[in-house]
Amino acid sequence: MKPQRTISAAAALAVFLLALTACMGDKPTAGPTDAPVTASPTTAASPEPGTAPEPSPLPSQPAGGETQVIKGTGIYNGQIDNHSIEIQTEEGPVAFELGAGMESVPETLNEEDKVAFEYVEKEVAGDASIKQRVLTKLSASKGSADKSSELPRTKQLALTLEGNREEKTATLASGDDYALYVFDILSFDPAKGRLYLKVNPDYYADIEKLPADFNLDNLLLEGREELSKTGEVKELKGDERAQAMQGARLFLTATGNNGTKKYIVKESGGQGYIIKMNIPYGDATEGFPPHAFASLNSLVNR
């Protein structure tokens, strides 16, 4: 009867397995459902106590865009050219471009002055790794010699004569709360505020101090009306104006039968001036302007 027990045990096992399978078949199996899935709105997780939320990344600056203002201090090394200067900083000597309206600021500084400055960085188009530093403020800091109060008696001024760049010695002269350096071929009358050629006083530049609230638009109209009596009036703008005179806010010129007249509004140390130049035809027509402009570029408010 042993074989019968073996068969019965096998049958019993088969029946058990069938029953187990039937029971499992009654349960739903995991799988995709026919009901649509609705996404519930997500809410930002609150940061854990004592943990600051991670800041969102700022958008990158476009090429040529300005960043925030950066402040610094250093030692003024001198002017590189009409548009840039060098300052000794903690990083070493650094070149800075002069911002708009700052062309005359270097004239108020001495080399080795301690300076405070502010600037912005601009990306150079085509190479974002190169930063151009553009000054927005520059002044002598405490403990520095200030040209507005202490000025050397003589100074070397650069000028271009017959296409050649030269440096010549000029001597300090004082006017109505301002000072400038005058070459030996020129003279300065402080009572009249007139800079003129010694050998021919018909070549001159009159300097007139402006009130703090001067209106540039009104001065433009005044200058045009005044110069129109000489000839067609031309206004210099942008780089052309900056190259003609440092710190110029307005530069008008007119040429007629008797020569050239110029009407210029210049700022130095926050003070405005009108400069009226008379350049008649003659032997000094070419030599007077570069000397006069170099002297007028040295003008500082006191």
Image (tube, grey):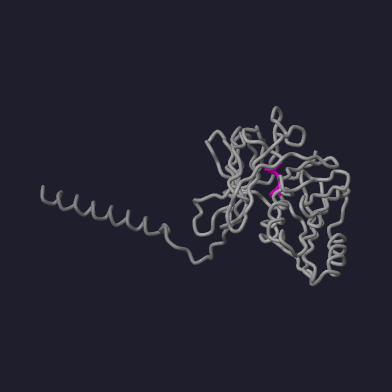
Q: Is residue 130 left or right of residue 248?
A: left
Residue 44 in view: no
Q: Quadrant of residue 153?
A: top right
- Position of residue 172 relative to residue 264, above or below, is above
Task: Report if residue 104 lies within the magenta region.
Answer: yes
Q: Is residue 14 left or right of residue 272?
A: left
Measuring 61% from the left and 34% from the top, which residue is drawn there?
75
Span shown in magenta: 102-107
Q: Position of residue 4 (x, y in %)?
A: 13, 51
- Position of residue 283 relative to residue 174, above or below, is below
Q: Residue furthest top?
A: 143
Q: Quadrant of the C terminus?
A: top right
- Position of residue 81 relative to residue 264, above or below, is above
**Of 3 and 28, which appears nearest the observer?**
28
Q: Position of residue 110 (x, y in %)?
A: 66, 36
Q: Quadrant of residue 257?
A: bottom right
Task: Report if residue 144 lies within the magenta region.
Answer: no
**Of 194 and 269, which appears nearest the observer?**
194
**Of 139 and 244, which appears nearest the observer?**
244
Q: Position of residue 264 (x, y in %)?
A: 79, 57
**Of 181 and 213, which appears nearest the observer?**
181
* Number of on-image labels: 0
Measuring 87% from the left and 67% from the top, which residue is drawn there?
225
Measuring 88% from the left and 61% from the top, which residue is drawn there?
218
- Position of residue 25 relative to residue 81, above or below, is below
Q: Is residue 270 left or right of residue 104?
A: right
Q: Position of residue 287 (x, y in %)?
A: 68, 56
Residue 108 in view: yes
